[in-house]
């Protein structure tokens, strides 16, 4: 029971047995929908705040208007993610707060991208939701079966991509050098982004499988919130990668 999602691991459901209501897959999906709604609501706040400020032609003022929400959302989201990962019982509180924080950050980032490449954000949102629906359908109908070999391959590939991103961040921070195909808009760069988007989509099936196993094992009801939170981590990654892909295509 492995997954590329850092907050949804094999040990997540070990030793958890409900005496009352139990976790279900449908309940987890419903809570995921609520978290998505919270992200959209708070994201729309920073989205409109940035674009309204940018309408006057002063880009620096627009950035300053959303920077506290953007950076505050990123920092708060990271802290809340750590709290949720180590204290799943609190997920009913921390998961919605995480979604609110991420919404503020994603709204600001998305507005900046929209100003540069008009129309890409709506496309990214629709594609993310479409990928979620397709992968859930493929998993629930058994078209995609999460076998041990499949799981191992996706986890290994995800770890490789994460390591590559960390190396790129380190190079840019200390040497001002970047790995070209991560950022360039040529055929190689677009191909790399397509690969990462596909990998993020496959991680959704691993999340579905592990949540399904947790429900089968009789995990308590509050773990639905934790499972929904874990899905949000993957969905945020998927959305950002689709947004990166679309921006490369526009360039």
Image (cartoon, helix red, strand yellow):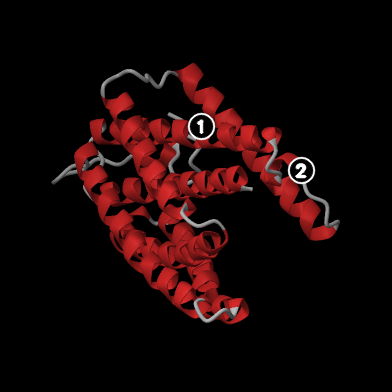
Residue 141 versus residue 134 in the image, above or below: above
At label 2, counting other C-alpha atoms closer than 10 Å, the crowd grade (few under 14, some 14-19, many 20 or more) is: few
Who's the residue at 54% across and 78% down the image? 62
Q: Quadrant of the N terminus?
A: top left
Q: Is residue 216 left or right of residue 147?
A: left
Asked where in the image residue 246 lies, by quadrant, the reply is top right
Residue farthest toward the right in the current orientation of the protein: 175
Q: Residue at x 78, y 59 (%)?
A: 173
Q: Position of residue 136 (x, y in %)?
A: 31, 32
* In the image, residue 116 above or below residue 161: below
- Can residue 14 be seen from the camera position used here? no
Q: Could you say which quadrant of the image residue 159 lies in? A: top right
Give x and y (percent) for residue 38: 31, 62
Q: Nearer the viewer, residue 54 or 195?
A: 54
Q: CA distance from mark 2 to mark 1?
A: 20 Å
- Residue 149: where, in percent of width, then height? 50, 17
> What's the mark number on residue 198?
1
14 vs 23, left or right, is: right
- Residue 77 higher or lower than 250, as above or below: below
Residue at x 41% of width, y 36% of height: 204
Q: What SS does tag 2 mark? A: helix
Name the element at disc 1.
helix
Instruction: Name which of mark 2 and mark 1 comes first in the sequence.
Output: 2
Relative to 20, say whether 25 is above or below: above
- Numbered tag placed on residue 247 in the rendering: none
Residue linked to disc 2 = 180
Quadrant in the rendering for residue 117:
bottom right
């Amino acid at each position: 029971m492995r997954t590329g999602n850092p907050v949804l691991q094999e040990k997540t459901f070990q030793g958890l047995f409900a005496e009352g209501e139990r976790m279900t897959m449908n309940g987890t999906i419903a809570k995921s929908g609520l978290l998505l709604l919270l992200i959209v609501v708070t994201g729309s706040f920073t989205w409109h705040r940035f674009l309204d400020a940018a309408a006057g032609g002063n880009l620096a003022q627009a950035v300053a208007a959303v920077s506290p929400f953007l950076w505050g959302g990123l920092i708060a989201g990271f802290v809340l993610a750590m709290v949720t990962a180590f204290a799943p019982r609190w997920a009913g509180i921390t998961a919605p707060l995480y979604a609110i924080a991420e919404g503020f950050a994603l709204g600001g980032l998305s507005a900046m991208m929209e100003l540069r490449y008009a129309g890409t954000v709506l496309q990214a949102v629709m594609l993310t939701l479409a990928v979620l629906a397709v992968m859930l359908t493929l998993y629930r109908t058994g078209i995609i079966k999460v076998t041990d070999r499949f799981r191992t391959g996706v986890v290994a590939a995800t770890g490789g991509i994460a390591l590559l991103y960390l190396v790129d961040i380190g190079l840019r921070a200390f040497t001002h050098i970047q790995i070209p195909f991560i950022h360039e808009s040529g055929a190689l760069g677009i191909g790399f982004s397509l690969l990462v988007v596909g990998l993020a989509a496959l991680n959704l099936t691993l999340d579905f499988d592990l949540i399904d196993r947790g429900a089968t094992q009789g995990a308590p009801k509050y773990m639905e919130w934790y499972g929904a939170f874990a899905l949000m981590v993957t969905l945020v990654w998927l959305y950002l990668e689709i947004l990166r892909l679309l921006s490369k295509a526009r360039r």
